[in-house]
Image: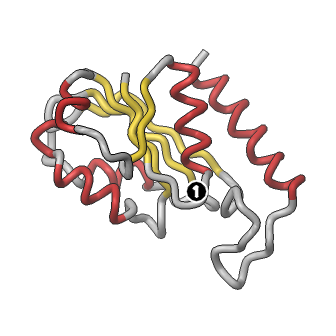
Amino acid sequence: MLTIYFSGTGNTKYIADLFSQKMNAKCVSVENDIDFVTTIKGYDTIAFCYPIYNSRVPRIMREFVHNHMEDLIGKKVIILITQQAFSGDGARVFTDLFEEGAIEVIYAEHFNMQQNMGNIPIFWTLFKPTEHSKQKHIEKAGKKMNIVWQ
């Protein structure tokens, strides 16, 4: 299994790494400078991890899928989304990038996370996360991962 992720703040990298360790999967960022065509062809199942931004897949992930559409057709896909608040459609909007039947989604999960793993608020209206609140979200995500992938 291959895990491909984009992480703007560290949340999604944390989830991608945690999932990959649990599943003994290779884990790479869409920002890595590797031969993705060859890498993707070597796997039947691919997990995609990304943050959901106002019910939109991040541009870098949309462009990645567009650039590797041929390589992804026929793959089994797992979708893992990080979010600060429940959007409800984080996995579905990813499937909208493909023609119907092009991929087989075998599982999707949303992980509520603090706005970022760093100390700088993304939006001025949000409070700076405390170490305690960040740790609480990390522990909750780890428990959820353990329940889902026992």
Q: Amino acid at mark 1?
A: Gln
Q: Residue furthest right?
A: 132
Percent position of residue 65, x then y: 24, 50
Would residue 98 appear left or right of 26 to someone viewing this image?
Answer: left
In the rendered view of the protein, which quadrant contains the N terminus? top left
Q: Residue placed at 45% from the left, 22% from the top?
A: 25
Q: Provide residue 78's location: percent of width, then percent of height.
A: 39, 33
Q: Residue at the spot x=51%, y=19% of the render?
A: 23
* Residue occupying the far left of the picture: 70
Relative to the observer, which residue lies in front, 24 or 95?
24
Horizontal and vertical percent position of residue 71: 14, 36
* Left or right of residue 128: residue 61: left
State which quadrant residue 93 falls in. Answer: bottom left
Classify 10 Å Cα crowding around label 1: few (below 14), some (14-19), many (20 and above). Answer: many
Q: Secondary structure at mark 1?
A: strand
77 in relation to 135, above or below = above
For label 1, the residue is 83
* Coordinates of residue 47 in the picture (x, y in percent): 39, 34
Residue lying at the far front of the rendered structure: 33
Q: Residue at the location (52% across, 60% down)? A: 8
Position of residue 111 relative to residue 76, above or below, is below
Say left or right for 126 vs 145: right
Colour scheme employed for the rendering of this structure: secondary structure
Residue 13 falls in image quadrant: top right
Question: Picture quarter containing residue 127?
Answer: bottom right
